[in-house]
Amino acid sequence: MSLGSRDQTRQRALGDQVDTADPRGMDLAEAHRQHIIRWFYECPPGMHLRLGEMHTADPRFTAHYEEQAEGLAAYVRDAIAANAERKERAAG
């Protein structure tokens, strides 16, 4: 999935009010994590969770997502958190 299509998919999920704890919301977060792993560095769920927190804690991250859609920074942060929790439950 290209960066542009991934952004559009997240925007659509937000617009469609897909709950971040819904498997579709978590799957978007997991696709983001896999993108980081593929192109940049290992990103275990705990690290991804901390990166997700930056989406609203760091104004630069927030601005990037809010330019795309109002509320998207918090939506992505929450989807990442839900996905990290899902991964933790699955690990045991």
Image (cartoon, rainbow, N blue to C red):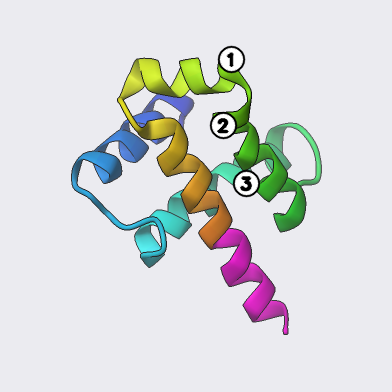
Residue that mark 1 sits on = 60
Mark-to-mark CA distance, 3 and 1: 19 Å
Q: Residue at x 52, y 43 (%)?
A: 77
- Of mark 3 and mark 1, the one earlier in the sequence is 3
Is residue 23 at least partly visible in the picture? Answer: yes
Query: Could you tell me residue 40's position as x and y percent?
Result: 75, 32
Category of crowding for the residue at label 3, using alpha-carbon neighbours closer than 10 angstroms: few (below 14), some (14–19), many (at least 20): many
- Of mark 3 and mark 2, the one earlier in the sequence is 3
Q: Amino acid at mark 3?
A: Arg
Q: Nearer the viewer, mark 3 or mark 1?
A: 1
Is residue 1 at least partly visible in the picture? Answer: no
Q: Main secondary structure of the magenta part?
A: helix
| Quadrant housing the N terminus | top left
Vertical side of 65 occupied by 47: above or below: below
Query: Could you tell me residue 51's position as x and y percent?
Result: 68, 38
Q: Residue at x 58, y 14 (%)?
A: 60
- Of mark 2 and mark 1, the one earlier in the sequence is 2
Residue that mark 2 sits on = 55
Circle 2/circle 1 CB separation < 8 Å: no
Q: Is label 3 in a helix, a strand or a loop?
A: helix
Image-based side of 50 in relation to 9, left or right? right
Q: Amino acid at mark 2?
A: His
Vertical side of 1 occupied by 21: above or below: below
Magenta residue span: 83-92
Image-based side of 79 in relation to 39, left or right? left
Q: Nearer the viewer, mark 3 or mark 2?
A: 2
Of residues 14 and 44, which is closer to you in this image?
A: 14
Q: Which mark is residue 33?
A: 3
Q: Amino acid at mark 1?
A: Arg
